[in-house]
Image (spheres, grey):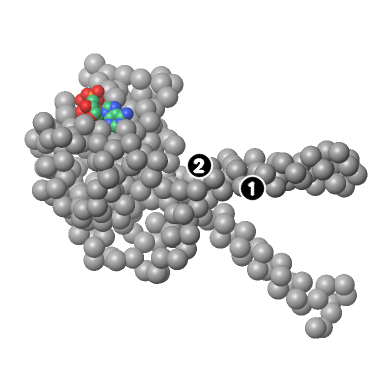
């Protein structure tokens, strides 16, 4: 193997491969709740490295042992996320754009019909953060997104109309789910629980959460912990296209969302209720 001073071509290849893997790892965790854990691990590794360099034998021994146990603890804690990541890595490239296009249209049409009839609805669409833990709070389903199915789910008196629906790609995977309520920091305190559940879930995950207000018959999108303004059908379709069903947007690393849903909005309802 030719040498460049002390550095061989193999070393360069090694560094390039590690850089590639680290970057791919970053793309997988960016925008998910695993980011904070990764930060914690880096701090831990930094302290451990410093302890090694400074020859602090006891500290580096303890941190080394804790690290070994920690790896197993992380695997147990993040088992659902790891499974989702492996599934995603193994999934064939190129999404079923035909199915996605149909899901987008059906989803938007169902939202419009629910809004016209003032039937309250809450729908979370999974992006990169797995929503399995929220789906587990409801009733598991596996059905294609369709207008009549979504209307039936949210119909008043329907057994699963209470709570949120979770969509993965073009399939409804759960209904009647409990979403985390937005922490009452003041901005959205005056909203009802359906809207605060939408904001709450979008705060903790990168999901796109759609809400139809029973009181106002409006359609809104919550994203990144913020609630957007009332949307027309065309605007909703555009949001769904760019945020969920456009394959390049789906794979891109998390970035501040664009469009009305990203803007810090004041509640616009009279008397403060959405
Ligand atoms: N944590 C939650 N997770 C999922 N769904 C929830 C949650 N909290 C409330 N909901 C849903 O919201 C409904 C109550 O909505 P509420 O009237 O309090 O909210 P709102 O934001 O004022 O909405 P609307 O404008 O439709 O009245 C519940 O019946 C339930 O279906």
The N terminus, quarter of image: bottom right
Q: Work out which residue is located at the far right of the displayed protein and give it.
A: 55
Q: Nearer the viewer, mark 1 or mark 2?
A: 1
**Considering depth in this image, is 6 or 228 the residue closer to the camera?**
6
Front-most of residues 115 and 207: 207
- In the image, is residue 272 above or below residue 149? above
Residue under label 1: 71
Residue at the bottom extreme? Answer: 1
Q: Is residue 199 above or below residue 63?
A: above
Please, what secondary structure does the residue beneath circle 1 have? helix
Task: Tell me whether circle 1 and circle 2 mark residues in contact (CB < 8 Å).
Answer: no
Q: Position of residue 66 (x, y in %)?
A: 72, 41
Task: Provide residue 8's location: percent of width, then percent of height.
Answer: 81, 76
- Residue 250, visible in the rendered structure: yes
Relative to the observer, which residue lies in front, 228 or 157?
A: 157
Marks 1 and 2, the one that precedes in the sequence: 2
What residue appears at the point 39 percent right and 27 percent down from the top-left corner? 182
Q: Is mark 2 within 8 Å of ligand 1?
A: no
- The reply to whether residue 221 is in sight is no
Examine the rendered structure and indicate whether residue 28 appears above or below residue 164. Answer: below
* Residue 30 rendering spot, x and y as whole percentages: 52, 49
Residue drawn at x 31%, y 19% as measured from the top left: 190
In the picture of the structure, the residue carrying the numbered disc 2 is 33
Mark 1 is surrounded, within 10 Å at the Cα level, by few (under 14), some (14 to 19) or many (20 or more) other residues, namely: few
**Quarter location, residue 183:** top left
The image quarter containing residue 138 is top left
**Ligand 1 within 8 Å, label 1 CB:** no
- Using the numbered discs, state the Cα–Cα distance from disc 1 to disc 2 in whole angstroms: 17 Å
Which quadrant of the rendered structure holds the C terminus?
top left
Horizontal side of residue 29 vs 97, given as left or right: right
């Amino acid at each position: 193997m030719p040498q460049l001073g002390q550095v061989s071509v193999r070393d360069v290849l090694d560094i390039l491969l590690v850089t590639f893997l680290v970057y791919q790892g970053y793309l997988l965790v960016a925008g998910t709740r695993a980011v904070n854990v990764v930060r914690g691990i880096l701090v831990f590794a930094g302290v451990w490295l410093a302890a090694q360099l400074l020859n602090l034998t006891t500290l580096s021994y303890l941190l080394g042992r804790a690290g070994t146990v920690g790896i197993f603890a992380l695997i147990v804690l993040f088992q659902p996320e790891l499974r989702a990541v492996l599934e995603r890595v193994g999934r064939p490239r190129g999404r079923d754009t035909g199915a996605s296009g149909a899901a987008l249209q059906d989803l938007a049409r169902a939202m419009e019909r629910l809004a016209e009839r003032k039937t309250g609805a809450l729908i979370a669409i999974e992006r990169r953060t797995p929503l399995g833990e929220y789906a587990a709070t409801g009733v598991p389903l596996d059905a294609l997104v369709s207008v009549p199915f979504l209307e039936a789910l949210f119909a008043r008196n329907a057994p699963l109309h209470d709570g949120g629906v979770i969509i993965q790609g073009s399939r409804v995977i759960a209904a009647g789910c409990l979403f985390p309520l937005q922490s009452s920091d003041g901005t959205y305190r005056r909203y009802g629980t359906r809207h605060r559940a939408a904001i709450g879930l979008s705060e903790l995950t990168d999901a796109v959460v759609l809400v139809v207000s029973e009181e106002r018959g409006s359609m809104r999108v919550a994203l990144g912990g913020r609630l957007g303004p009332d949307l027309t059908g065309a605007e909703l379709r555009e949001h769904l296209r760019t945020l969920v069903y456009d394959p390049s947007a789906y794979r891109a690393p998390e970035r501040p969302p664009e469009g009305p849903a990203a803007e810090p909005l004041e509640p616009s309802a009279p008397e403060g209720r959405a």
